[in-house]
Image (cartoon, rainbow, N blue to C red):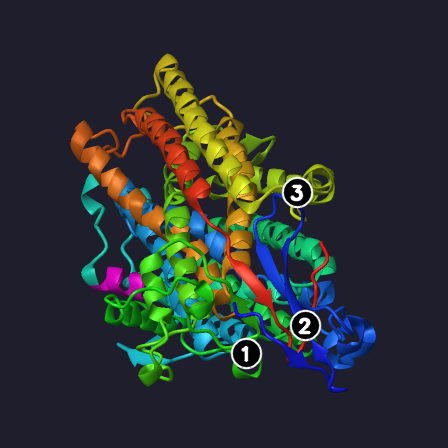
Amino acid sequence: MRSSESTSGEGELIDRKKIKIKRGGKNSEMVYIIDVKSKQASKMGFFRNVNTQPQQQSKKGGNKATIFVYALETMTFSSNGVSLFSYFHGYMNFSLTKSATALTNYLGTAFLLSLFGGFISDTYLSRFKTCVIFGFLEVLALIQQKTKNVPFFQGYALLAVQAHLRQLRPFPCKDVVGPAGCEPASTNQEAMLFTSLYLVALGTGGIKAALPSLGADQFDEMEPEEAAPLSSYFNWYMFFLNLGAIFGVTFVVWINTNQGWDWSFGVCSIAMVISVLVLSMGRSVYRNNTPSGSPLTRILQVFVAAIRNRNLPLPARAEELHELHDKEAEQSETLQRTDQFRFLDHAAIVRQSAVTDTWKTCTVTQVEETKIIVRMLPIILSTVFMNTCLAQLQTFSIQQSTTTDRKIGNFQIPASSIPLIPLLFMSILIPLYDQVFVPTARKFTGIPTGITHLQRVGIGLVLSAISMGVSGIVETHRKSVAVKHNMVDSSDPLPMSIFWIGIQYAIFGVADIFTLVGLLNFFYAESSLGMKSLGTAISWCSFAFGYYTSTVVVNVVNSVSGGWLASDNLNRDKLEYFYWLLAGLSVVNFGVYLLCASWYKHKKVLVKHGDSDYVENS
């Protein structure tokens, strides 16, 4: 970055100097390099006060805005995420393996489509508009057609129609008397099912990318007094996500168990309408982002320019690379050059004949944006396997719970409600983490988040490995109970409480508190201003790849092992071996993550606000 001089409004020459600040103490994850004008700082607004900021802007954002962001969308997605396995197996007559594969593919696609939602949000729409548009995409009656005199709706409405009309799905095998009448779902019935599911996935993907970032935008990460509330926001986002999921796995699951799946999907549609309306109520108090053009185009320009300039020598001084300064710069954030991926620095070599051609010469900030994305990839890939383990809890563990004693007095817990155990556990632990652990850790580390985001993710990975090990032990015990009571081939519930299955869920729930929130916070903090939604979407991709990997792992394990998971009878399968295999691979994955986390270099930012700069106090 070139040192420069500028003139104040009174014509006095002001010297600049650089001050490097590590926010939150020596262990902070982000380094800010601030240009400071040493004279007349207070006159020129380098140190903010309420008199120098627009009153209208000061009234927006903050905790009052995030109240509306804690929408109910997660209720419908979370509740159906666990319930659909039972729907596939019990009502669409899919096998256990096919049910697990169908569910993980659906969930994986929903999270992967967050990349599309993040691209739309950063490029064309604000995050608020993205949430509203994609939210209504999930709701019924967006498009109504006539197909064989049957109303055809998008999203949850189509699921409700199929669940309601007998001719659109096979007769459930569980209700068939005798072996001859059980029939699989037809091609047309499966096509209708997956069309509706993936319309829901598309809407979910857009919301997953934009909603967390919309809430985080209500806090200025450059303001020291808002650093702690920003970190706290992600904790409370997870808390309200859990509350919605609790409602989903209790009330919504009760509806599909006692009233039918058509009613269940109808309630999901209503919940989505309510969530979008609640979100829209806060429009007047939101700090809205302004789309800054396609981040994918900017990334592609860097690679093209770097290849074109590959034979040009890099300058000896980084300050000689191309960057826009002061009034030339339209961006409010300037990134400083880092030493990794030096080949990409060729994109910022100044070519006088092509300085205005962004496909031949890019700014250092643009190059660093690209480096950030490249650096993020090993981090996200090293967290994928944890979500492969999560997929097993949403498939095979649900099936395990159907074989246990689910009664509490005269009340029988639906198998799809077993995730209620970790959700309640997490809802208690998240406030304790935010209000007790973080302030205590902050006193020792000086970091607003208590511990760094990457440390938080690592703790979650360790807990996920423990959860898989415990799952293997619990499954061994469950099978021993079946053998002891001569119930290996019986469909009756075993004399074993469902709360045994809840142990593995509870441990993994704690892992989620650390890893999911840590990833969301990390990718939002590390992404450049023009890629916040895309960065959030990348964090969700860990789930997508985890679910897809689960499908591959299940199929490979079945093939190599000779059928550990091939039977529809868990008492004769080798599910405990599968869990222990996942536990061992999770330990190996944690070692890989440690290497990736130690290699990662955090971004360096020159904070600029309009024509003035200011020092960020830590």
Q: Secondary structure at mark 1?
A: loop
Q: Which residue is mark 1?
A: 290
Q: Which residue is mark 2?
A: 15
Quadrant occupied by the C terminus? bottom right
Could you say which is closer to the camera, residue 189 or residue 33?
33
* Earlier residue among tags 3 and 2: 2
Q: Please say if 77 is above or below 128.
A: above
Q: In the image, which disc is placed on residue 162?
A: none
Q: Quadrant of residue 68?
A: bottom right
The answer to whether any part of residue 262 appears in the image is: no
Magenta span has 191? yes
Q: Secondary structure at mark 3?
A: loop
Q: Nearer the viewer, mark 2 or mark 1?
A: 2
Label 3 crowd (10 A; few <14 / some 14-19 / many >=20) = many
Residue type (three-letter) at the residue carrying disc 2? Asp
Q: Which residue is mark 3?
A: 450
Q: Please say if 425 is above or below 474.
A: below
Residue type (three-letter) at the residue carrying disc 1? Thr
Image coords of residue 26 (percent x, y): 63, 44
- Looking at the rendering, the stretch of residues picked out in magenta corresponds to 188-195
Mark 3–mark 1 CB contact (< 8 Å): no
Could you say which is closer to the camera, residue 491 or residue 40?
40
